[in-house]
């Protein structure tokens, strides 16, 4: 591989040049090996954020990140594989009911997930609230479970796209997370390396999401769809609303409980709607004809959930952790709920202990927010709007202030918005 000086690559991007394949291969590899220093990669990431990248540069950058580690070979799995990735939202527990549902419809679902940082929760944190459940499994266990149960949700091993692991941590502290080429290559390098045949992206749009507006979310979605399709992964994206939290529960164990309600045939309408919409897309992308609504109703998805939790040491019948303190927030006047702001509720849940400020922090499994109202609901003065749960009472006052601001009560019905805003294929 040819050698470059990092400073020349930085200068080239700073001045708006298109990086060559050789420059990209070198800089990603050299950074992973520690030859390019963090401060140099920080400068390059900022230049990429400000100058952008061409589709060819993004494709090459993604390929270089994949090449930094191993690529899983799922050819031993006999069912078609289909995965889903969400760009992250508040109350977004959809992976939990969706993975066993799609598996119960005949697909194999390899879900490599992460932990939460900031106001959005992580799937692994939610599942770790189930006593005994293990997030880390070996590649062999992963493939065996995928074949036998059809559903695995686990931590991505260290071997998968190590360049991304290092770069993501750096972007997090250098104000460069928001660059579309870097987000798209980060997500897609892991998904392509994971070996799935089909992929459905749930790109969140709104106050509680990374992408605050539809135009930016569309650009991110089409960049990722193109990367997937060009790598032989049948990829489509749904753009979905994240101005309001999904469902009524925000917080780790609270979200597991709500997911189990969905698997049992109940649960909030929006969680059921999005689970079914994503399931239909995953099944179509994997070439499987099945009606997920019927499979959900049959109880087969619940059976797969139980098998999936047990396979990783968890007890699906165990009592989940409950936070020690509960405080309610009540309406001060009669009116109609105009908004329950996803970002505000996400921050409140995080302040209550459901999320972490630094990646090594523990989370409180029982902490979080239960919504008692959604936009459009009529309320009377004194009605409960939110329930706040925390283990540490000292966390409640700051969370309470944020949560109170998140619920807007007015006198008119808010305009209704669709949950699924667009589809990009
Ligand atoms: N999630 C990722 O995995 N990478 C990003 O860059 C942003 C969100």
Image (cartoon, rainbow, N blue to C red):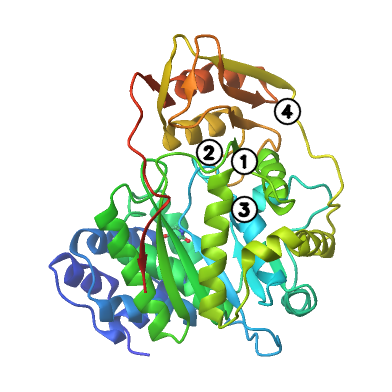
**In this rendering, which labeled residue sits more in front, label 1 or label 3?**
3
Q: Which residue is mark 2?
A: 357
Query: Neighbour class for label 4 at 10 Å: few (<14), some, many (≥20)?
Result: many
Q: Kindly report the distance in space between the C-alpha atoms of the residues bearing marks 2 and 1.
A: 7 Å
- CA–CA distance in space, label 1 to label 3: 16 Å
Q: Say which mark, if any, is on residue 123.
A: 3
Taking the image as drawn, is residue 61 in sight? Answer: no
Residue at (69%, 60%) from the top-left corner? 296
Task: Give the labeled residue for mark 4.
Answer: 323
Vertically, is 181 above or below 215? below
Q: Position of residue 49 (x, y in %)?
A: 25, 59
Residue at image position (39%, 49%) is 418
Q: Badge 1, how many Cα within 10 Å: few under 14, some, many 20+?
A: few
Left or right: where 225 falls relative to 370: left
- Mark 1 sits on what residue? 361
Disc 1 on helix, strand or loop? loop
- Mark 2 or mark 4: which is in front? 4
Q: Measured from the top left, where is residue 6 in percent x and y?
A: 29, 72
């Amino acid at each position: 591989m040819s050698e470059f000086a990092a400073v020349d690559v930085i200068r080239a991007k700073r001045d708006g040049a298109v990086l060559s394949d050789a420059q990209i291969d070198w800089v990603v590899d050299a950074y992973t090996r520690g030859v390019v220093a963090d401060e140099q990669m920080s400068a390059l990431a900022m230049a990429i954020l400000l100058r952008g990248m061409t589709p060819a540069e993004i494709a090459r950058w993604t390929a270089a990140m994949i090449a930094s580690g191993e690529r899983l070979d799922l050819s031993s799995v006999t069912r078609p594989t289909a995965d889903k990735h969400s760009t992250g939202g508040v109350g977004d527990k959809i992976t939990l009911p969706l993975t066993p549902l799609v598996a119960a419809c005949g697909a194999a679902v390899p879900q490599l997930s992460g932990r939460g940082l900031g106001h959005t929760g992580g799937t692994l944190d939610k599942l770790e609230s189930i006593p005994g459940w293990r997030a880390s499994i070996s590649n062999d266990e992963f493939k065996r479970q995928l074949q036998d149960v059809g559903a695995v949700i686990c931590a991505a091993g260290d071997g998968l796209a190590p360049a991304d692991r290092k770069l993501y941590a750096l972007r997090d502290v250098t104000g460069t997370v928001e660059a579309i080429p870097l987000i798209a290559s980060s997500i897609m390098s892991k998904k392509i390396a994971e070996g799935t045949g089909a992929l459905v992206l749930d790109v969140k749009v709104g106050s509680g999401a990374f992408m605050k507006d539809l135009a930016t979310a569309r650009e991110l979605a089409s960049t990722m769809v193109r990367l997937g399709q060009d790598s032989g992964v049948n990829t489509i994206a749904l753009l979905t609303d994240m101005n309001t939290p999904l469902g009524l529960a925000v917080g780790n164990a609270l979200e597991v409980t709500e997911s189990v309600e969905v698997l049992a045939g109940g649960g909030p309408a929006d969680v059921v709607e999005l689970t079914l919409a994503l399931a239909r897309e995953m099944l179509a992308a994997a070439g499987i004809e099945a009606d997920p609504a019927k499979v959900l109703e049959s109880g087969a998805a619940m059976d797969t959930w139980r098998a999936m939790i047990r396979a990783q040491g968890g007890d699906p019948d165990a009592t989940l952790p409950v936070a020690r303190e509960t405080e309610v927030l009540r309406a001060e006047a009669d009116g109609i709920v105009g908004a329950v702001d996803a970002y505000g509720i996400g921050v409140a849940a995080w302040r209550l202990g459901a999320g972490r400020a630094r990646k090594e922090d523990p989370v409180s499994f029982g902490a979080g927010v239960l919504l008692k109202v959604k936009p459009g609901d009529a309320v009377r003065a004194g009605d409960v709007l939110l329930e706040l749960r925390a283990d540490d009472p000292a966390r409640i006052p700051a969370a309470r202030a944020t949560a109170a601001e998140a619920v807007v009560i007015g006198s008119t019905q808010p305009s209704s918005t669709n949950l699924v805003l667009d589809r990009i294929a």
